[in-house]
Amino acid sequence: MSLTLANAALLRSQNFINQQWCSAGQGRRFAVTNPATGEVFAHVPDSDDDDAGRAADAAAEAFPAWSARPARERAQLIKRWHARILANQEDLARIISAEQGKPLTEARGEVLYGASYVEWFAEEATRICGDIVAEAVPGRKLLVLKEPVGVVAAITPWNFPLAMIARKIAPALAAGCTVVAKPAEDTPLTALALVWLAEQAGLPAGVLNIVTASRGSTPNVVDAWLADSRVRKITFTGSTPVGKHLARESAGTLKKLSLELGGNAPFIVFEDADLDAAVDGLMAAKFRNGGQTCVCPNRVYVHEAVHDDFVQRLARRVGLLHVGPATDENAQIGPMINARAVDKIERHVEDAVAKGARVVTGGRRVRTADGPHYYAPTVLIDASPSMALSCEETFGPVAPVFRFRDEAEVIRDANDTPFGLAAYFYSNDVRRIWRVAQALETGMVGINEGAIAAEVAPFGGVKESGYGREGSRHGLDDYLHTKYLCQGQLG
Ligand code: SIN
């Protein structure tokens, strides 16, 4: 696939360090491929610890001046970045689709979604404030200041190549931090384009730096930042094992961490739910990005009284989803990110069927002219806790339905996981709504709603889904620390 853009300058193929577009020190590069066909359409630097160190040098040097800028000036620069993102939205959507496989219509939505975080944090920059505390002792003034934490390392995933990096970089810059970033090896081009737009917006030298690295070289880059005492915070979205590694390895320099990790979201349909609304909610939450989201429902629990009716309505809708290349304007489910992803989905479905699940629709790979990395949107029934898909993230377009009898049982099963990112439930009983919302052990709960993420809301998990929040005022607070001033001798 050739990637033709209205603004060809967006297609960057170098690192950006201290306001210079540059190759990796060793001159190595790796290929960026179309996830459906495996076709190579770009090469980017395969960076190492030296490149990571140079990026950290630049960010550390830029920090004093950037953090000292008035918040309104930082806000204006971030707003200029936002305007440039919007002005290039169609090209950005094309880059996302090309390297990640997200259908073009969804990629356009991701650009707006990511841009909304940039705008939000530009506005929030001017609202950072501390406290003046009532004095406990006469003649003393007690003040609480909020200060930027310092250099931030942002390590971002492939499933939302624009939105995830935008909602890390924007609050960091708004708070007065400087940034070193490493995008996922599958999707570096969107991140590089975003950084180029920030440069065009006038961001000063060293404030935002990015290096790309292949899967093999990523540990060298990340380890360099983990060991660097000037890097004061790591913000990461990705798997729980990697999140735990970052937590362990950053202990040496006690960095602040924001970890948005794996999920295993339950989606519960009670007997008093509006079934059409519940199907709409599940379609939105489960099949977005082909099921490749951390917050998408992994286990669908349906009360036995409405089970058959719900499954019939759901299967009808799922069977109509159009599978096709990301560039097809009608596609609703694009290719999965790579062969390993499709193999995992296939393994989960085969394991479930071997343990008694039945396929209502889908349940197979789809071989298109575009390649073998597609999986049919799938509904399974008779799912049970012994199946791999009940405890591991499938990260694909598969909705396994579990039947339940009562509220206590379904709450116990929904919480029976080390993960705690998102949960969803549908009910029209106001007392039950409060009971269940409080009983679910997750950072986010969708109540009669499947699309819960927004720039104004705190996104993040509990348990082994991580800590820290993105979006909302809490998402800015994660890039600030608290300094207490006590002035005496005033009496
Ligand atoms: C994710 O899947 O990691 C993020 C999804 C979202 O922002 O809604």
Image: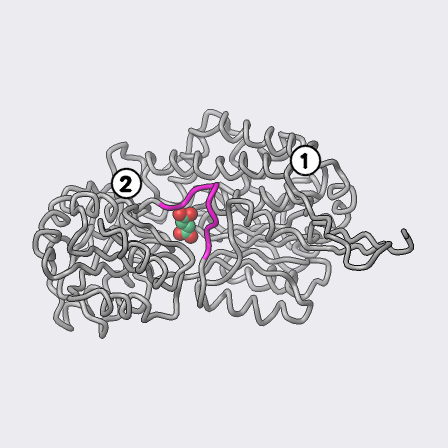
- Of mark 2 and mark 1, the one earlier in the sequence is 1
Which mark is drawn over residue 424?
A: none
Count neighbours of disc 1 (C-alpha within 10 A) and say few if under 14, some if 14 to 19, many if 20 or more: many
Q: CA distance from mark 2 to mark 1?
A: 40 Å
Q: Mark 2 highlights which residue?
A: 325
| Residue that appears at 61% across and 59% down | 221
User: Residue 413's x, y, as percent?
Assistant: 27, 69
| Residue that appears at 67% across and 66% down | 227
Instruction: Report the magenta residues as a range.
Output: 452-460
Is residue 477 shown to the viewer in this render? Answer: yes
| Residue that appears at 68% across and 58% down | 232
Classify residue 266 by image quadrant.
Answer: bottom left
Please indicate whether residue 377 sits to the left or right of residue 262 in the image: left
Q: Main secondary structure of the magenta part?
A: loop
Count neighbours of disc 2 (C-alpha within 10 A) and say few if under 14, some if 14 to 19, many if 20 or more: many
User: Residue 45's x, y, as percent?
Assistant: 57, 49
Please indicate whether residue 422 sits to the left or right of residue 63 in the image: left
Position of residue 244 relative to residue 11, above or below, is: below
Is residue 33 shown to the viewer in this render? Answer: no
In the rendered image, which quarter contains the N terminus?
A: top left
Q: Amino acid at mark 2?
A: Pro
Q: Mark 1 highlights which residue?
A: 74
Q: Nearer the viewer, residue 439 or 74?
A: 439
User: Residue 276's x, y, as percent?
Assistant: 16, 43
Q: Nearer the viewer, residue 45 or 385?
A: 385
Q: Amino acid at mark 1?
A: Arg
Is 334 part of what is drawn in magenta?
A: no
Secondary structure state at the residue bearing disc 2: loop
Classify residue 306 by image quadrant.
Answer: bottom left
Secondary structure state at the residue bearing disc 1: helix
